[in-house]
Amino acid sequence: MPPVDTLNTTVTSLVSASSFCVRYSCTGSSSPEQVWQYTPAATGNVTFTVLPTQADDDLSIYVRTACADTATELDCSDAGYGGEADTVTVRVTAGTPVFVIV
């Protein structure tokens, strides 16, 4: 199924700018993250992409249904190298928020 929404680097609903929401995931890191809440308008797949602004930026992206609960993680991406984009595609339900953590 094609994505019903595409979200690049602009997210409108910042929940926290310095959270330790994600302590264990595909990176195992406990660095501060920025957390956004995203509520899809339709049910289907949504693709989230985080694009670094500098060549040495090493970003990760996680999507969860409950920010602090590792068991609710839908997907995680850490390209492993600075300067690379990270992308995840997850199944979402219309009107049900997910947390996008970078």
Image (tube, grey):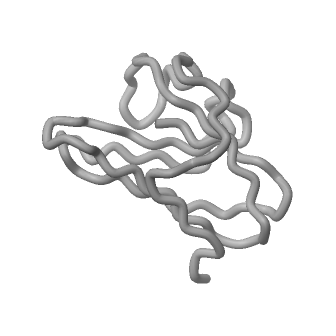
Most foreground residue, 53 or 21: 53
Measuring 57% from the left and 48% from the top, which residue is drawn there? 11
Residue occupying the far right of the picture: 95
- Residue 30 image position (x, y, % from top left): 43, 17
Image-quadrant location for residue 59: top left
Closer to the camera in the image, 24 or 64: 64
Is 59 placed above or below 87 here? above
Q: Position of residue 44 (x, y in %)?
A: 70, 72
Seen in the image, is 93 located left or right of residue 57? right
Percent of width and height locating residue 5: 62, 70
- Total marks shown come to 0
Q: State left or right for residue 32 relative to residue 72.
A: left
Quarter holding the N terminus is bottom right
Residue under the image location 61 percent in, 49 percent down: 74
Give me the residue at 47% from left, 45% from top: 76
Residue toward you, 23 or 17: 17
Whether residue 55 sits left or right of residue 70 in the image: it is left
Residue lying at the far left in this picture: please name it: 55
In this rendering, the answer to whether 7 lies above or below 12 is: below
Q: Position of residue 72 (x, y in %)?
A: 68, 39
The residue that appears at 77% across and 48% down in the rendered structure is 97
Above or below — where is 66 with respect to 97?
above
Position of 88 with respect to 73 (left or right) is left
Position above or below: 78 against 31: below
Between 24 and 19, the one lying in front of the other is 19
> Residue extending furthest bottom?
1
